[in-house]
Amino acid sequence: MAGNIATRAAYGDALVEFGSDERIIVMDADLSKSTKTDGFQKKYPDRHINMGIAEANLMCTAAGLATCGKIVFASSFAVFAAGRAFEQVRNSICYPNLNVKIGATHAGISVGEDGASHQAIEDIAIMRSIPNISIISPCDAASSRFAVKAAIENDGPFYLRFGRLAVPQIYDENTKFEFGKGMVLKDGTDVSIIANGLMVQYALEAAKILAEQDINARVIDIHTIKPIDRDIIIKAAKETGCIVTAEEHTIMGGLGSAVAEVVTSEYPVPVKMVGIEDKFGKSGNPYELLEIYGLTAENIAAKAIESMQML
Amino acid sequence: MEQKEILSLKKTATNIRKGILRATCSAGSGHPGGSLSITDIMTYLYFKEMNIDPKEPKNPDRDRFVMSKGHCAPVLYSTLAERGFFPVEDLETLRKTDSYLEGHPHMRTVPGVDMSTGSLAQGMSAAVGMALAGKIDNKDYRVFVGLGDGELEEGLIWEASMAAAHYKLDNMICFVDYNGLQIDGKITDVMNPEPIADKFEAFGWYVQSIDAHDYEQIEKAIENAKNQKGKPNMIVAHSIKGKGVSFMEGQAGWHGVAPKPEERDRAIAELDEYLASLDA
């Protein structure tokens, strides 16, 4: 399997791979080298549109193109795509249910040195609250490719969340993904670890730590946060009795909340959440930041045990 | 333009104005003032200029219209109804729970509405996308936009304006309904967007100023716009808020207040009198 690859790079590669479809337009806001849409720009210059540093206009213009039959990928950093342009996404893309795919890169604190202003830790919570939009947060290159493919194949607005940091490959490139369906990466009976994005690798490591203590943890990757795979979550609640979630996002309104919404209404079991706890990020080395904010395999394992102790 | 044609447009516009009054009165809320001020432009576009067919509201080659000042849904709906996109009687269901006529234009429920709007400036920006799509696909449709003068206070207008000029969107023809009034009073008192024509010129647009209620001026400006290449078009249309109803004209108070039944009847009686004078 390939070495470490940033999901933003896999996003850029997927746009090139699927870009021969004449309906596809890729838009950027002066960040094409960072969001990695520059590969598409080189191959299909007539269908790449740079909107300059104007994210609000990026989103509404994308909506206008979509009304004319285009499949539009609108790219910027997650903090601007979901934050600055929130109301444009809500009113001009989601309300009329238009075919705009928001390619949001540089999500989470693993952005690193740029610091809090550029670290989107609330984007999923914001996007998840809007009707009509689907959200995918892939963990590696293969699942990022799937995210782009799913967005092309399914009509309507999508929010695709990609990271800046190079991450290890979880999936074989031939893995079959299904939109809206989670993946069981390791079966287990004592506790379920439900993760997405960059935290999937740490969820797998946490399962190994727990195994050393004779705890058999199930590990689930929920790449599609909306619509969420209710079945896989309810099954995990029933069969393992307790859950810990792990996400590179605030624990308010992200994956943990989405899992808790399903569990509390269908089959209540303890749910512990690993994520960012109502704090802004800060500048620093990405790996050091992950340690500081508790986004580690050790913390997931500790919270898994806490979740088990609540039974 | 022949006098006969002008007379016909005036009659149509008067009927559209009556629809605005009936709809907002029935709803008990809505925005008659700015609807009445842009009625003549809407009438010209939908009854003389635009390449549209009520039987094929989604035809990919049609001209588009985006009501960027989406609160003027009453004039858009009344125009579309008068043009045959849906029954005129439905106007009186405006803003009601079981109606498809949402308070602000919604492209998913109302036949003939090309973009959902209501949050100011977003419509103009979406129109930039439609015009870009036309250029990419080598189609010759035009994109018309209705803007409010108060709407120009939104920053997004200027992001969209920069982009339209950058991409040389000469297939875009925008109108500023320059009635000088917004909810809180005169635009020059609330947040002065003037000089409007100079600003768009500085942004690289082909700008013309006209009387919004003079069909010959509307026609000439659109013909000029069609004949110039390389720049997006802004037509600054000086208008009267509440145009056509004596007690509404020039009153900011009628921006977002619906007429009561008695006021509606008085207004419609005035418009009927005007229609009779046109016939005579």
Image: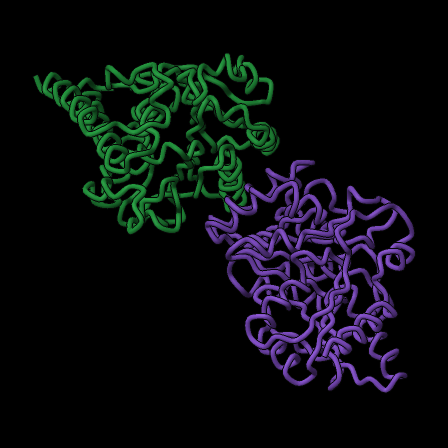
Q: Nearer the viewer, residue B128 or A6?
A: A6
Judged left or right of residue A98, residue B270 is: left
Above or below, B45 against A261 in this view is above
Residue, x 86% and y 50% (percent of image)?
A112
> Quarter of the image holding residue B52?
top left
Q: Is residue A172 visible?
A: no
The hue used for chain A is: purple
Foreground of the two, A293 or A310: A310
Query: Measured along the vertical axis of the image, is residue B222 above or below residue A122?
Result: above
> What x and y, as percent, mark residue A180?
59, 70
Residue A2, compared with residue B244, is above or below; it is below
Q: Colour of chain B?
A: green
Q: Residue at 68%, 56% (x, y): give it.
A: A252
> In this orientation, which residue lies closer to the viewer: A197 or B279?
A197
Report the label total. 0
Left or right: A30 with respect to B51? right
**Is B196 situated left or right of A195 in this image?**
left
